[in-house]
């Protein structure tokens, strides 16, 4: 496929996704500009990031540092400078690499990870934006903070000079109705904002459930398959 053909393919998919977001916002009585599209480009090449940036996409998401770091550098060299969201589970030994290119880390779910990020980000000119990943169902092993740990992590991020608490992120559990999941997330977000007034971001919703996420206050939706197509298996 030529670059021109791929650009046309992405432009058509982007128009469809933006249409879905617009219709979901209208149904929820919300302005469409309240919701930011994060294009999840994992497993796709930097050339797609560059094309998407040229089509007006401002935010991209990646979940593996070993892929994201070189991709961000290649895109930057080509003049594409989207906001990079790190959305995968993050090991503490990767934080020094991630803070070099990420504008947002959406997957902070422990005090130890927050502290490691704060140390690594200390030399950044601007604080690193952080979302606390919420485990909606409290299941172990899938990532995310639940119960009192959610508030401990949030306070740790908020107290770090090198970090800026943006809000919360979650993935709807597969065995939950999305409306139930995102309603629960919205309630947690409202509680968080009572103690941290600037933490208004709710990153929720993917290709299959973005409408439910928008109904329940999502400010960011993370869209991969509907925008870029079916992914190749991870290497």
Image: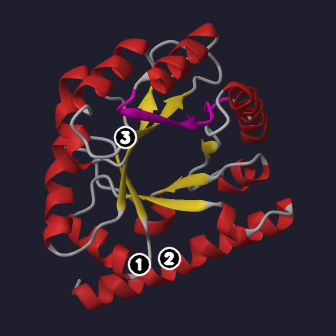
Q: Residue at x 64, y 11 (%)?
A: 147
Which percent across, then down, holds residue 20? 67, 69
Which percent across, then down, holds residue 14? 50, 76
Q: Which residues are magenta?
A: 161-175
Write down the quadrant of residue 73 in the picture.
Answer: bottom left
Q: Is residue 68 magenta?
A: no
Q: Quadrant of the N terminus?
A: bottom left
Closer mark to the observer between disc 1 and disc 3: 3
Q: CA distance from mark 2 to mark 3?
A: 33 Å
Which percent across, then down, holds residue 58? 43, 67
Q: Secondary structure at mark 3?
A: loop
Numbered label attached to residue 10: 1
Q: Quadrant of the C terminus?
A: top left
User: Which residue is the site of mark 2?
Assistant: 13
Q: Is residue 167 magenta?
A: yes
Q: CA distance from mark 1 to mark 3?
A: 32 Å
Height in image: 38 above or below 14?
above
**Dot 2: few (<14), some (14–19), or many (≥20) neighbours within 10 Å?**
some
Which percent across, then down, holds residue 125? 27, 46
| Viewer-side residue, 219 vs 155 | 155
User: Which residue is the site of mark 3?
Assistant: 127
């Amino acid at each position: 496929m030529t670059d021109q053909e791929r650009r046309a393919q992405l432009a058509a998919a982007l128009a469809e996704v933006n249409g879905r977001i617009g219709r979901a916002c209208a149904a929820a009585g919300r302005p469409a500009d309240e919701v930011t599209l994060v294009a999840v480009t994992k497993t796709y090449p930097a050339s797609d990031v560059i094309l998407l940036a040229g089509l007006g996409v401002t935010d991209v998401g990646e979940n593996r540092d070993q892929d994201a770091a070189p991709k961000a550098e290649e895109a930057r060299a080509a003049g594409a400078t989207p906001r990079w969201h790190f959305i995968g589970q993050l090991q503490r030994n990767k934080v020094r690499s991630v803070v070099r290119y990420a504008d947002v880390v959406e997957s902070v779910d422990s005090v130890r990870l927050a502290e490691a990020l704060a140390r690594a980000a200390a030399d950044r000119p601007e604080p690193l934006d952080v979302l606390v990943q919420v485990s909606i169902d409290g299941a172990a092993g899938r990532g995310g903070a639940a119960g009192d740990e959610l508030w401990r992590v949030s306070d740790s991020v908020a107290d770090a000079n090198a970090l800026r608490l943006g809000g919360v992120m979650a993935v709807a559990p597969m065995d939950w109705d999305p409306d139930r999941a995102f309603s629960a997330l919205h309630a947690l977000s409202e509680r968080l904002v009572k103690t941290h007034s600037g933490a208004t971001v709710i990153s929720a919703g993917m290709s299959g459930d973005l409408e439910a996420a928008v109904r329940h206050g999502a400010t960011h939706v993370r869209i991969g398959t509907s925008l870029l197509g079916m992914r190749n298996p991870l290497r």
